[in-house]
Amino acid sequence: MAGVEGRVVAVTGAGGGLGREYARTLAAAGARLVVNDLGGARDGTGQGHAAADAVVEEIRGAGGEAVASYDSVADEAGGRGVVATALDAFGRVDGVVANAGILRDAAFHKMGAADWDAVQRVHLDGTYHVVRAAWPHFREQRHGRVVVAASTSGIYGNFGQANYGAAKAGMIGLIQTLAIEGRKYCILANAIAPMAATRMTADVAPPEILEKLAPAHVAPVVGHLLSDECTDNGTVIVAGGGQVHQVRQFMTRGATFVEVPSIEDVAARWDEVVDLAGAVPGTNPVG
């Protein structure tokens, strides 16, 4: 197959914003879509069918194929439900875009356990539940694509988003391992860190910045990561406002201690440890 034509892709959180744009772009390129959305508020409360149904109708109205899923990805049954919808409607699943998310921002000293847990359940656990349900099918057919919606908050941090940033960083760690485990089965796992004006970001950035960040700029990048032609694996891509770049971890040359150093020995050579001159892409030394 070429691109995503004929492929079956499940997009979570596809009832609006970036997820809607991903689903519409993929459908226009010939993919068959599971449009998953719980239909809740930005903080994860409430639910409804209208959001997912509207996107399905948009896709069908344009001549594409799509079905709706209203499952909550925050629990295992919901993750299985998303994949079951794909299998029931189309007989297979080829890709997952783990995009569903909520926000419960607060400065860390004001962040309660409930707000921490709720964000982890949707973002990190939700990604696990859906990808885990699809994984056996990817392995059996020796083909699969995973794209997770990370964030610059998970890469660089952001005030008031300790819960969100931690979850997004966890998703990056997840795709690094999935990339290793899936490689021999032709399963590729990558992350997109989108910058776009959506319901989620309406009060996160100044209006003059958001007006330059249409979700449409991000969707083609996600489409490429899901395509048969894409060979990247374990890659983190930041995309928004027409800019697309890769983010990667690097390691310095560092310092080597022949004997166990004292605290003072470490301090004396600390400039060597953190000197970025000559840094190279990092690898797992025990992996």
Image: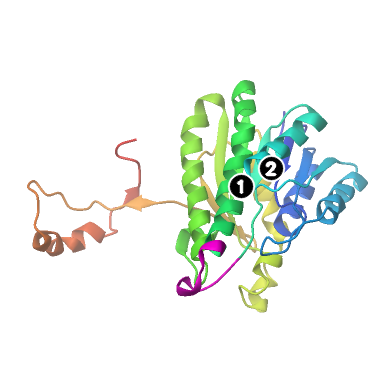
Q: Residue 222 or 138: which is nearer the viewer?
A: 138
Left or right, residue 247 beside residue 269: right
Q: Amino acid at mark 1?
A: Gly
* Residue 155 painted magenta: no
**Residue name at image x 9 percent, y 54 percent:** 261
Marks 1 and 2 sit apart, C-alpha to C-alpha, by 9 Å
Left or right, residue 261 beside residue 83: left
Is there any visible trace of residue 92 in the rendered image? yes
Dot 1: within a 10 Å radius of its alpha carbon, few (fewer than 14), some, or many (20 or more) residues? Answer: many
Q: How is the image coloured?
A: rainbow
Left or right, residue 259 beside residue 62: left
Across and down, in percent, residue 10 comes to 72, 41
Q: What label does residue 126 carry, if any?
A: 1
Q: Residue 75 or 141: which is nearer the viewer?
A: 75
Q: What label does residue 78 carry, if any?
A: 2
Q: Secondary structure at mark 1?
A: helix
Looking at the image, is 101 positioned above or below residue 109? Answer: above
**Residue name at image x 71 percent, y 64 percent:** 214
**Residue name at image x 60 percent, y 66 percent:** 104
Left or right, residue 182 beside residue 50: left
Q: Earlier in the sequence, mark 1 or mark 2?
A: 2
Q: Nearer the viewer, mark 1 or mark 2?
A: 2
Across and down, in percent, residue 13 comes to 71, 52
Quarter assignment of residue 119:
bottom right
**Residue extent of the magenta highlight:** 104-114
Dot 2: within a 10 Å radius of its alpha carbon, few (fewer than 14), some, or many (20 or more) residues? Answer: many
Q: Secondary structure at mark 2?
A: helix
Outermost residue to the right: 61
Q: Amino acid at mark 2?
A: Gly
